[in-house]
Amino acid sequence: MNSDFQRSKDLWSPAKMSRFIESLIVRLPIPPFYLTTPESIPANSENRFQIVDGLQRLSSLRRFVIEKKMRLRGLELLPDLDGRTFEDLPRPVQRAIERAQVTVYLIRPNTPKPVKFIIFNRMNTGGLTLNDQEIRHALNPGYPAKYLDDLVESPTFRHFIRVRHARMRDQELALRYIAFRLTPPTKYKRGLKRFLDDAMGEIDRLPHEMLQAFSIDFEAALATAFALLGRHAFSRKRENRPALNKALFDTWTVNLAILPPKERNKLVKNREALEFEYWRMLAPGGKFENSISKDTSSPESVKDRFEAIATLFSRFTAEES
């Protein structure tokens, strides 16, 4: 149940879990389950299968039938069963659940990664469709997945960044940073999804010393960004509840990460002047604002926004404190 394909096992609401149980009781057709057998798991292991699609449904069954921690809620066809646990159900109803037939597809472990990407992207069973980062995580188990997880689990990231943890949106932010550290923005070509796919696969081939240095730089970049802009770091607007902009996140973190500590300190010393110039750059309709709000994955937008922030920083790092 500790699937690499979806991190959280309990994303469904109690009502949604209950209606899935209800479907089993009345024998409504349910979507198939997709499993795989990772090559790293011994063939004689009791835990040979890994869940690709169906984690929420299996979690519902475990909570209701095995752990008996759940009461049925919001049933549509069998409202008389509302509020009951598995043990409270009449024995014929229990048997209907226990004997329910399911369809399972097994994806062989030697299936090429591009084919797996196609399979995962086309699966839409009415539950939680895998997003791009969940697929990358699943197809790059081991060190790449753990490395990104460590980046976003750091105290600095958790303290400053407010983004949903459950669907790996935080890991995608960290991957954007790594991708543009590995490939300079000037060499980026259109296709952000493929760009991030390639970067995720590259992590496993990089020296650990390089990745450790990237991690240290990442922490320093986050701390500096918030020293400069506070809770409005990585936001397009100075709002009460600022929304994080992905394009600003990769642009700021990478540009700050490649600066020596002494130059980051200069930026902080000139914080007020830098902040004033930065918000002027974000005026609606301007070149920089367009690069982080319209077609942000185009090579032109990537080049424009990285150059704009680098130029801004150079103005203040070149000045004597």
Image (cartoon, rainbow, N blue to C red):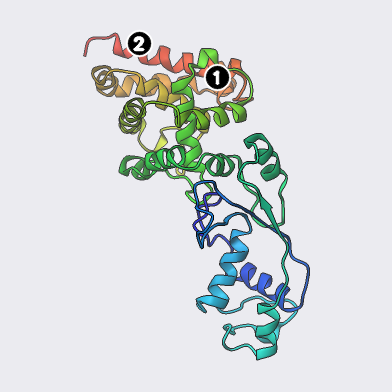
Classify the position of the C terminus by image quarter: top left
Residue at figure coordinates x 31%, y 44% from the top left:
155
Residue 255 sits in which quadrant? top left
Amino acid type at circle 2 is Arg
Q: Nearer the viewer, residue 309 or 132?
A: 132
Furthest-left residue in this view: 321
Q: Residues within 10 Å of mark 2 (few under 14, many from 20)?
A: few
Q: Position of residue 203 (x, y in %)?
A: 45, 30
Q: Position of residue 86 (x, y in %)?
A: 58, 83
The label nearer to you, 1 versus 2, is 1
Distance (Cα) linking label 1 and label 2: 20 Å
Residue 316 horizontal side relative to residue 120, left or right: left
Please indicate, yes or no, whether residue 235 appears anywhere in the rendered image. Answer: no
Residue at figure coordinates x 61%, y 44% from the top left:
131
Furthest-bottom residue in this view: 90
Secondary structure at badge 1 equals: helix
Residue 316 horizontal side relative to residue 149, left or right: left
Q: Earlier in the sequence, mark 1 or mark 2?
A: 1
Residue at figure coordinates x 76%, y 78% from the top left:
26
Q: Position of residue 265 (x, y in %)?
A: 24, 22
Residue 189 sits in which quadrant? top right
Q: Residues within 10 Å of mark 1 (few under 14, many from 20)?
A: many
Q: Position of residue 186 (x, y in %)?
A: 52, 12
Residue 175, compared with residue 87, is above or below; it is above
The residue indicated by pointer 2 is 315
The residue indicated by pointer 1 is 302
Please indicate, yes or no, whether residue 295 appears anywhere in the rendered image. Answer: yes
Secondary structure at badge 2 equals: helix
Residue 152 sits in which quadrant? top left
Q: Nearer the viewer, residue 310 or 175?
A: 175
